[in-house]
């Protein structure tokens, strides 16, 4: 499939017409040209058909990473999710703009942000909530030893991207859940902020 896309749209010198990113059975096709994306979607669908596979419409989106677009009669919000990450671009001024590479680098007028997706954050909250619920009557060290690898693993997975705001939000949510766990066991105590 990747070879098919690369053969359809080979690089023109240093210019890449299409990027194909995959992980297991998930993939993303990226191009500046909407026509190329549509042709790739058709070609991939035809390539998958003889082996009894198909592109799932509910998991397929055509969008722009910078601006909302209208596609098939509905407005598609900018950015997309892939493997638990949200990839999106934001317009910025000249002092914060990204640059093209090479000798004649120029400002591109936007920054790309990759951060944990909302779906991944909600899933992590549910996992932590489930562990706390399972350990309602367990001693505090048992709960801590169960939560630490879950929180550390998730944090390590997302530590290489723009995640400070997400980590702060999750930290507060987990703190509130643990406070409720403590209150349910020990009763309300005076708490000063």
Image (cartoon, grey):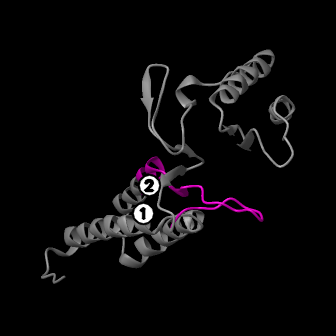
Q: How many marks?
A: 2
Cα distance between the residues tagged 2 and 1: 8 Å
Whether 42 is drawn above or below 159: the answer is above
Given residues 21 and 105, the one toward you in this image is 105
> What is the quadrant of residue 20 in the picture?
top right
Quick one: quadrant of the C terminus? bottom left
Residue 182 point in image, percent of width and height? 25, 73
Earlier-in-chain disc, 2 versus 1: 2
Whether 56 is drawn above or below 161: the answer is above
Given residues 24 and 30, the one toward you in this image is 30
> Residue drawn at (45%, 47%), measured in percent from left and top?
119
> What is the quadrant of residue 37 in the picture?
top right
For the residues labelled 2 and 1, say whether their Cβ atoms are less than 8 Å apart: yes
Q: Badge 2, how many Cα within 10 Å: few under 14, some, many 20+?
A: some
Q: Which mark is residue 121?
A: 2
Give the magenta part as a residue range.
Answer: 96-124
Whether 37 is drawn above or below 145: the answer is above
Given residues 7 and 106, the one toward you in this image is 106
Left/right placement of residue 45 relative to residue 135 reads right
> Residue drawn at (68%, 21%), measured in percent from left and top?
54
Left/right placement of residue 183 relative to residue 44 reads left
> Residue drawn at (68%, 59%), measured in percent from left and top?
100
Q: Which mark is residue 166?
A: 1
Whether 32 is drawn above or below 163: the answer is above
Q: Badge 1, how many Cα within 10 Å: few under 14, some, many 20+?
A: some
Local secondary structure at mark 1: helix
Given residues 150 and 157, the one toward you in this image is 157
Residue 191 in magenta stretch: no
């Amino acid at each position: 499939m990747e070879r098919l896309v690369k053969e359809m749209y080979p690089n023109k010198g240093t210019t890449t017409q299409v990027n194909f990113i995959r992980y297991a059975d998930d993939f993303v096709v990226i191009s500046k040209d909407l026509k190329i994306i549509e042709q790739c979607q058709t070609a991939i669908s035809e390539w998958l058909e003889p082996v009894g596979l198909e592109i799932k419409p509910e998991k397929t989106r055509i969008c722009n990473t910078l601006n909302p677009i209208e596609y098939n009669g509905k407005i598609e919000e900018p950015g997309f999710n892939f493997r638990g990450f949200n990839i999106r671009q934001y317009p910025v001024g000249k002092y914060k703009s990204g640059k093209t590479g090479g000798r004649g680098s120029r400002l591109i007028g936007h920054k790309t942000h990759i951060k944990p997706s909302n779906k991944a954050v909600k899933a992590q909250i549910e996992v932590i909530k489930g562990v706390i619920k399972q350990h309602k009557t367990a001693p505090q060290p048992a709960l801590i030893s169960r939560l630490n690898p879950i929180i550390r693993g998730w944090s390590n997975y997302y530590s290489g991207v723009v995640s400070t705001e997400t980590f702060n939000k999750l930290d507060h949510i987990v703190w509130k859940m643990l406070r409720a766990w403590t209150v349910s066991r020990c009763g309300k105590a005076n708490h000063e902020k």
